[in-house]
Amino acid sequence: MRRYATAVAAAMVLLLGAGSTAHAATPPPSEFGNDWDDPRTATPPIARPDGPSCTIRIVNHQFVNFDPFVGAYAPPAECAGPWQTVVLTVHGAVRGRQFDRLGRLAIGGATIFKTSTPEPSVDGIAWTVEKDVTAYSALLSRPQQVTMWLGNVVDDTYTGVLDIQADLTFYPGGRPTGTPDDVLPLADTASDGPDTTGSLTVARNTERLVAEVYATGSGGGCEEFWYITAPSASGYSCPADNGPYREVQVLVDGEIAGIAMPYPHIYTGGWSNPFLWYAIPAPRAFNVAPVTYDLSPFVGRLTDGKRHQVRVHVLGVPAGQGGWEAPTNFFAWRDAGSAVVAGALLASHVSELDNAVTVGSSDVTVAAAHKFTAVGYVQTSHGRVTYNVQRTVGNTSHHVWGEQENPDALKAEWTDNSTVVVAGRQPSITVHNARYLLDGSVIISAENRLTTTFTVTDAATHSTVGPKSSTRWTQDDTFTGTASWTLGVPRPDRHATGTSRQRYQLHGDTCYDHTIATVNGYFTEDSSGC
């Protein structure tokens, strides 16, 4: 499962460039060749307002090493804010030979986009990712430094140069309800193994606070595939004595303020089989969604004008081992009628972690669960507001392998259920239940033929009920596929074959149901069910 031997849903879309149906009228080849269709996904497009817009380019760079791109951003004078929508568009192109790479884009020190890249064909591929970044409007309202990291190696073997452009498109017309007043990156950051530490200072009239953490296990080592690690007693080649359970915690001044499940990202070289992902990547591969936490119960402790320590901790990572990135931002909402908002944390509780790990002769079974609750209030110009946050996370998995880890298979489920109740002049209740499923296997035949079979689902249900409106939606993004290739031979002799399918369903105020499918790198289906 290690590479070759051995990274709100409706706001994201991966678009195919020109020629998206070029191969639909002809049969696909009998196996992979030197070229294939540009990658795309079935995720829904971003809703863009009618009317005028302005687009500015903030990145135009060829990444050939590990030096970051550094540039400048200034808000467009011809499209002055406030903006009803801001869309980030990232376009990439690469050809030759290259691994998948992990990158991120920051403005003013705040990460607004994280991504991994597709692996190219000899003739080259192009792809485009869009993300709604309206929530970062406060950050975009003034000039800022732009930094993009996309570490790459280009030499005589790995020839793929990552040619990247990033644009921001602004749609004037008024600030949407609920847009945060401040976007604050975690300051003074330092990383040490599974921990990222830094400081946070909020405005003294802050009345609500949400954190987002772009948490990914990456780097090609065992923590890129953290969900298959196993206790040392099992003999498996990726050891972790507490098993594969991982949890991303946010601690404020040393106290746990939130827990969450990390998403099991599959990058485009993952599970020993790039042929599986050449045309349809796994969910979230090109647009890494952050994990979010409602920290509002702790706001009353933070409005004293002082710097407070924040630590992001990935629970379960073996001591001294790295492999995780966790860029962190905070969204803050202010009370316009107060200079200072006071309050207090009334109670918080973290249950004992239930992490039952059973080790067999060639398998590991896990059943884990953890619960967090916090209640706090702030005294605002519009009365007392009380926040009650509850979050329950869990993981079950069965990992089984054969002699020399052949075959190697995992079936796992992760759940992350949160409820936020707000009591005050404008009471509300928000319930978000996320569920991630993974069922995959790798087997090498006597003829040295490697086959990966894979299904992964990113699903969620969401509801918000408030005094003036309510929102409900359900989402299911499922990828299925299988691919085979011959190991230990020159590229022309690999005789790789593969099929893949993705269906994205979103039901709520509107219906969206989109399916795409490929055979040997070429799209054979593109259909809508709504």
Image (cartoon, helix red, strand yellow):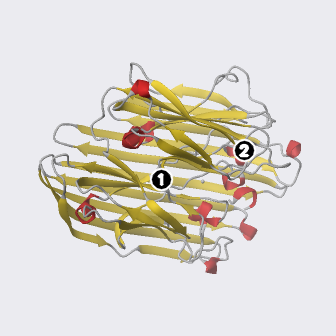
Looking at the picture, how far across and down is residue 6, in whole percent?
Answer: 72, 62
Residue 320 relative to residue 510: left or right: right
Image height check: is 231 above or below 332? below
In this view of the protein, which residue sits in the foreground, 219 or 276?
A: 219
Residue at the image position 69 percent from the left and 56 percent from the top = 442
Residue 436 — which label? 1
Give the SS element for disc 1: strand
Image height check: is 267 above or below 414? above
**So how many labels did they put on this image?**
2
Residue at the image position 74 percent from the left and 42 percent from the top = 161
Looking at the picture, how far across and down is residue 101, in whole percent?
Answer: 66, 50
Residue 275 — which label? 2
Residue at the image position 71 percent from the left and 67 percent from the top = 405
Mark with earlier residue (2, 1) = 2
In this view of the protein, which residue sits in the foreground, 355 or 155?
A: 155
Residue 289 in view in this figure? yes
- The amino acid type found where label 1 is placed reads Tyr
Crowd around label 1: few <14 · some 14–19 · many ≥20 (10 Å): many
- The amino acid type found where label 2 is placed reads Phe
Residue 251 in view in this figure? no
